[in-house]
Image (spheres, rainbow, N blue to C red):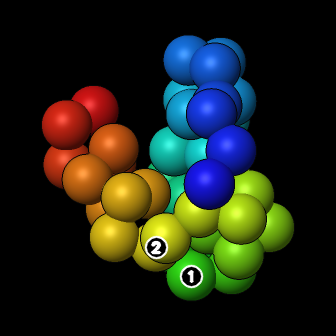
Amino acid sequence: MPKLSLDEKLEAIHRYQNGAEGVKSIAKSLRINHEVLRMWIRQY
């Protein structure tokens, strides 16, 4: 799993919040587990 910067994490959260992409597709594009992305979204 790649180590992502804060900016990359925030970009992923904003991509989800814009509603154009789902959690799984964003996570796949970043090569991370979708549950990790869900955790970031909850914490944000």
Instruction: Look at label 1 and name its amino acid.
Output: Lys
Q: Which circle's residue, 1 or 2, is located before the other in the chain?
A: 1
26 or 1, nearer to the observer: 1
- Image location of residue 7, percent across then percent down: 65, 18
Q: In this view, does 29 lie to the left or right of 36?
A: right
Residue receiving disc 1: 24
Quarter occupied by residue 6: top right
Instruction: Look at label 2 and name its amino acid.
Output: His
Quarter occupied by residue 18: bottom right
Quadrant occupied by the N terminus: bottom right
Asked whether residue 2 is in view, the answer is yes
Quarter occupied by residue 44: top left
The correct choice, above or below, for 29 with respect to 5 in the image is below
Residue found farthest to the top: 6
4 or 8, nearer to the observer: 4
Residue found farthest to the right: 29
Residue receiving disc 2: 34
- Image location of residue 43, percent across then percent down: 19, 37
| Dot 1 alpha-carbon crowd within 10 angstroms: few under 14, some 14 to 19, many 20 or more | some
User: Residue sitting at 50 percent across and 53 percent down?
Assistant: 17
**Which dot marks residue 36?**
none
Q: In this view, does 32 lie to the left or right of 29?
A: left
- Image location of residue 13, percent across then percent down: 51, 44
Q: Is residue 33 left or right of residue 28?
A: left
Asked whether residue 20 is in view, the answer is no
The correct choice, above or below, for 10 with respect to 13 in the image is above
| Dot 2 alpha-carbon crowd within 10 angstroms: few under 14, some 14 to 19, many 20 or more | some
Label 2: state its secondary structure: helix
- Image location of residue 8, percent across then percent down: 68, 30
Residue contact at pointers 1 and 2, CB within 8 angstroms: yes
Residue found farthest to the left: 43
Label 1: state its secondary structure: helix
